[in-house]
Amino acid sequence: MARPTPAPEIPAIIVSRRGAQRLRDGHVWVYRSDVMPADSVPPGSLVVVTDERGKLLGTAFYSSASQIAIRLLSRQPITDLEGLIRTRIQEAIAYRERVVRDTDAYRIIFSEADFLPGLIVDRYNDLLSLQVLTQAMDSESIRSVILSELNNSLKPAAIIERVDPKIRELEQLPPRSSGALQGDKTSTIFSMNGVKFHFDALEGQKTGAFLDQRENYAAAAQYAHGEALDVFCYQGGFALHLAERCSTVTGVDSSRPALEVADQNAGLNGREIEWIEANAFDLLRDYSEAGKQYNVIILDPPAFAKSKKNVDTALRGYKELNLRALKMLRPGGILVSCSCSYHVSQADFLAVIAEAGQDVHRNLRLLELRTQAKDHPILLNVPETAYLKCAILLLS
Ligand code: SAH
């Protein structure tokens, strides 16, 4: 069948053999070192990607700044970019309708994993929070298509953009401040698994809550009993879910603003939870030396390994946390241990927990080996889309 030829104004980018192989293997990124010099290609352009022989590999967004020079949009020529973006947004929404339950807060668009590289959109009840990560997604024409489609499909009360200044700097984009793109409302209350949370679009980390843990909250709650300690609790995601089943719940975090929201969330749900502002490493050391005991301990630290270089340090961090936690768990207790570092593999993460178990001479049964919630899809050919590990273990 004859393929339509791409519009002549779309610049072409040639990739090396290694880059071409990567795309043929199903990945969607090509690094700068695998792209032939492309100085005349404007930043953020839609480009046609070919191998050294001129064979078409697909159509992509080009970044002149990022190490990820090429983010593939389609393996075909694209004649109607606006139509493609609209369809992809509709498909992302339809996918959530199939897989998301018991919540009005979830990720609607997860960049590559929804074939919309460089765009993240989260829904919190009637608000949408949007983040742009690349030159191409930042163009006014693409922004206006995104807003128009989100409005048509979801009719939110407001759409708020959260800017990550570091990402804009890396992409060599002009600074921009966070704020409403439309509508006046910037805060709301959302609920997941029957638990209510405050959301303020202009406060907090990431785009608000850690939506990727939503299914893990419910899973952890199933096994919860007795006294629980939620370490790295942020705004209380795990703690609030455990509170229904546990006699006492304590949440620990080093961020006072996060704990203030956590406390408001407890009030919203009529729960009494103790919140402690502390460095988790210090607190776990002090508590374990003091002989404190719990029935459930959650460990959900920030990403320790931000790059491959930090993996060993990260593993040492996980080891220490898990060891301290295991020392404080009563027999029959539950450890929920998470890692959101993409660079730490699931196998290495489990090996560290196993080692910690050996060090305390206890047996650990793996009840559930979980990952991010399904609204944060994982593409098998794009390993970077799988980052969250959540092991639920029974200590005997
Ligand atoms: N479990 C949370 C998400 C945790 S994110 C949820 O489900 O919503 C990681 C948290 O670790 C952040 O809230 C951050 O403030 C906190 N943090 C980072 N370093 C810390 C430290 N050394 N001690 C205690 N908390 C820390």
Image: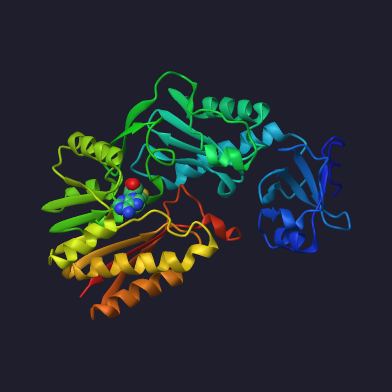
Query: What percent of the width, then of the height, locates residue 347?
Result: 45, 72
Query: What percent of the width, then of the height, locates residue 335?
Result: 26, 64
Looking at the picture, tell me which residue is in the foreground, 93 or 22. Answer: 22
Question: Quarter of the image containing the C terminus?
Answer: bottom left
Give left or right: position of 279 versus 27: left
Relative to 56, does residue 343 appear above or below in the rendering? Answer: below
Q: Can residue 349 be seen in this view?
A: yes
Query: What percent of the width, then of the height, locates residue 22?
Result: 70, 61
Residue lying at 77% horizontally and 54% vertically, measured from the top left: 35
Relative to 216, does residue 198 appear above or below in the rendering? Answer: above
Query: What percent of the width, then of the height, locates residue 284?
Result: 23, 61
Residue lying at 30% horizontally and 40% vertically, measured from the top left: 258
Query: Quadrant of the rendered structure where residue 201 is?
Result: top left
Residue lying at 73% horizontally and 61% vertically, measured from the top left: 24
Looking at the picture, tell me which residue is in the foreground, 134 or 46. Answer: 134
Looking at the picture, tell me which residue is in the foreground, 92 or 392. Answer: 392
